Image: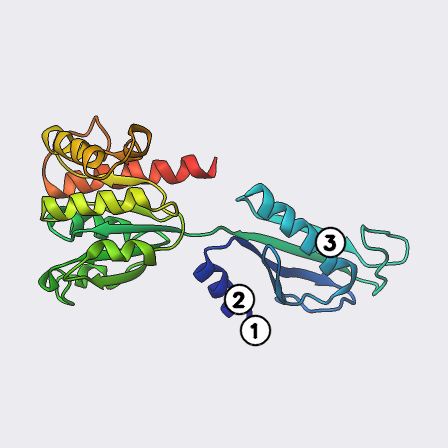
Amino acid sequence: MAWVAAVARLRARRESGVLVTVATVRGHAPRDAGAKLVVGQSETWGSIGGGNVEAVAIDRAREMIAASKPEPELLDFALNDKVVNRHGVQCCGGTVSILLEPLPAVQAVAIFGLGHVGLELARILSRQDLDLHLIDTRSDMLTKERLNPLSDAVAQVHVHHTPLLPEEVLAELPRGAHVLIMTHDHAEDAALCDAALRSQQLGSIGLIGSAAKWGRFRKRLATEGGHDEATIARIKTPIGMADITGKEPATIAVSVAADLLRTFETEVT
């Protein structure tokens, strides 16, 4: 499998990995500069020549994965019979530098409701390297023309038109996906909140709306949904940064996106 396909496979699985590249070669070495190896938690794809160099690189890559280490590293190897490394001697006669670049698992975000705020939020988040799921029951909210501002997205954008039961999309989301509920229909919002609380695979759950709306939802989730207080507390509302108080859709979207990015950083640390 080509290294590009291996990286894509890790991304699809939402697994972290490390891309290992032969950066420089002097003298004789098993592979030329540019050779690549992709290391996952339990699999590898490609090769940088085998032997001691590759074995040490794989060991270090898996240590980086376990430690969630975000910075790249450069390893230098002297390939002669006077140097004994972790996996023995490799005496090709040259020297090799190996670059290890972490491939963190990408975040996934689902926006339920592509109204004015939802679309502005999608525009901001589409500039991030993440999996972005856009869900709406209204087909006119998801037309190609309306979503055209996302045409140059850095994110991988997935559009879901769900005219009947949008909450069914929750089961299709990647594990750990962050959910933002902001549909045009409070009944739809309530159903999504209930379904999200019943899922154990989601990340954060955010709900847009007023204190009065949340008061009604909170009571309903307890009495009709049977959720206890600790479970209901998984829902964050209001969403966004408290010190940004503007009500324009773009302002709300900036606030929500900033708060979400802060959540991502908290997960990493």
Secondary structure under tag 2 reads helix
Sooner in the amino-acid sequence: mark 3 or mark 1: 1
Q: Is residue 155 visible?
A: no
Residue at image point 71% right, 62% down: 25
Q: CA distance from mark 2 to mark 3?
A: 20 Å
Which quadrant of the view contains residue 20?
bottom right
Q: Amino acid at mark 1?
A: Met
Do residues under tags 1 and 2 come within 8 Å of each other at their CB atoms? yes
Q: Which residue is mark 3?
A: 56
Q: Nearer the viewer, residue 93 or 267?
A: 267
Sooner in the amino-acid sequence: mark 2 or mark 3: 2
Q: Position of residue 73 (x, y in %)?
A: 62, 48
Q: Is residue 263 visible?
A: yes
Q: Which residue is mark 1?
A: 1
Question: Callout 1: 10 Å neighbours few (<14), some, many (20+)?
Answer: few
Q: Which residue is mark 2?
A: 6
Which quadrant of the view contains residue 264?
top left
